[in-house]
């Protein structure tokens, strides 16, 4: 089995916390390299990231990687967060720009993820292993796909150790992205982000938001199953496991699963890969 990692989001209610615990309990049996926790994504309150990584680390014994975005505030506020993570003994971070809350022109001292990565290196030296985001299908706001590749390279040049991609269903988009950035001199591991399919309506909504393309053949098959959740899950696991196999055969260095705090869909894929 290749190196795997899991992404969670911070729960806000007791019920969601229990759901996270159940998912972590099941998924940790797959011995992930680490579990990452999103920061302020989808409107979650920023402070919950720290609580959630602590929970995964202390209660579940997982290595953790808090996400941190430019929306985390001023230099001083970000420095304070970094100091807290360093004191807790964490060694990994995922550094992002984040998305601007609507109506705001600027949310902190940093505009782009590359500036945040530079600041983390300046403030903490080599303490953290830093991952950044990569977009095999191009970042949705990028007006120029080639410039987007250069902007990706800038994050690595600023000191990131590796990248995790946005999810995608077309393996050629990943292979092409890796080839393109290798030609630009980027040599760090680029781990595909994998979205297990549990619920097609939800997947469609996320994909529209983040610019991930759902191939027509997958959409058509999913639609054909209508409301039959069980068949959608089975088809989803098969399609995503096949994608993972092709990625690994083509040299992907690992797999990062967007779990959405649920174990079942991710586990079904992992079982097919075992
Ligand atoms: P950047 O790398 O800064 O790029 C953003 C855009 O700006 C791109 O279009 C790029 O081409 C452009 N750009 C970069 N540098 C320049 C420059 N110098 N001049 C002009 N244009 C430039 N969001 C959250 O809020 N919280 C999370 O926890 C979170 N986790 C994520 C995890 C992963 C693995 C991924 C793939 C995404 C995650 N996101 C998260 C979403 C991410 O924050 C958004 O996609 C955001 O819009 C871009 O973030 P980035 O770090 O890629 O930004």
Image: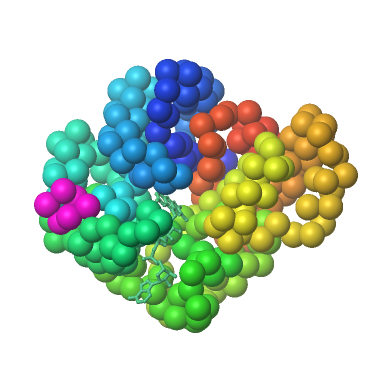
Q: Position of residue 84 (x, y in %)?
A: 17, 38
Residue 229 appears anywhere in the view: yes
Magenta span:
73-78
- Give the residue displayed 70% in from the left and 43% down from the top: 201
Quick one: which residue is furthest to the front in this view?
103
Pick the residue in front: 49 or 65.
49
Residue 57 appears anywhere in the view: no
Q: Position of residue 118 (x, y in %)?
A: 22, 64
* Relative side of 245 to 109, left or right: right
| Figure coloring | rainbow
Pick the residue in front: 100 or 192.
100
* Relative side of 19 to 107, left or right: right
Q: Position of residue 234 (x, y in %)?
A: 77, 35
* Relative side of 139 to 203, left or right: left
Tag count: 0
- Ligand 1 shows up in which quadrant of the image? bottom left
Q: Please say if 88 is above or below 91.
A: above
Q: Please say if 211 is above or below 33.
A: below
Q: Position of residue 128 (x, y in %)?
A: 24, 50
Please tell me in which quadrant of the rendered image residue 59 appears: top left
The quarter of the picture where the C terminus appears is: top right
- Give the residue displayed 29% in from the left and 53% down from the top: 71
Q: Please say if 51 is above or below 67.
A: above
Q: Please say if 167 is above or below 60.
A: below
């Amino acid at each position: 089995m290749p190196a795997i990692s899991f992404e969670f989001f911070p729960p806000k209610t007791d019920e969601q916390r229990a759901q996270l615990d159940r998912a972590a309990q099941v998924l940790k049996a797959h011995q992930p390299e680490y579990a990452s926790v999103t920061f302020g994504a989808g409107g979650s309150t920023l402070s919950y990231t720290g609580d959630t990584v602590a929970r995964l680390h202390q209660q579940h014994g997982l290595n953790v990687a808090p996400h941190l975005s430019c929306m985390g505030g001023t230099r001083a506020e970000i420095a304070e967060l970094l100091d807290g993570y360093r004191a807790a003994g964490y060694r990994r971070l995922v550094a992002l720009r984040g998305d601007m809350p609507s109506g705001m022109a600027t949310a902190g001292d940093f505009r782009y993820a590359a500036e945040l990565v530079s600041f983390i290196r300046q403030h903490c030296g080599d303490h953290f292993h830093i991952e950044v985001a990569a977009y095999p299908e191009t970042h949705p706001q990028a007006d120029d796909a080639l410039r987007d590749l250069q902007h990706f390279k800038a994050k690595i040049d600023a000191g990131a150790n590796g990248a995790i991609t946005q999810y995608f269903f077309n393996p050629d988009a990943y292979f092409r992205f890796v080839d393109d950035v290798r030609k630009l001199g980027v040599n760090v591991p680029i781990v595909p982000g994998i979205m297990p399919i549990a619920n097609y309506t939800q997947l469609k909504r996320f994909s529209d938001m983040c610019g991930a393309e759902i191939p027509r053949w997958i959409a058509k098959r999913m639609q054909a199953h209508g409301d039959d959740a069980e068949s959608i899950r089975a088809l989803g696991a098969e399609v995503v496991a096949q994608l993972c196999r092709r990625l690994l055969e083509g040299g992907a260095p690992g797999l990062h699963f967007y779990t959405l705090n649920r174990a079942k869909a991710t586990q079904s894929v992992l079982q097919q890969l075992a």
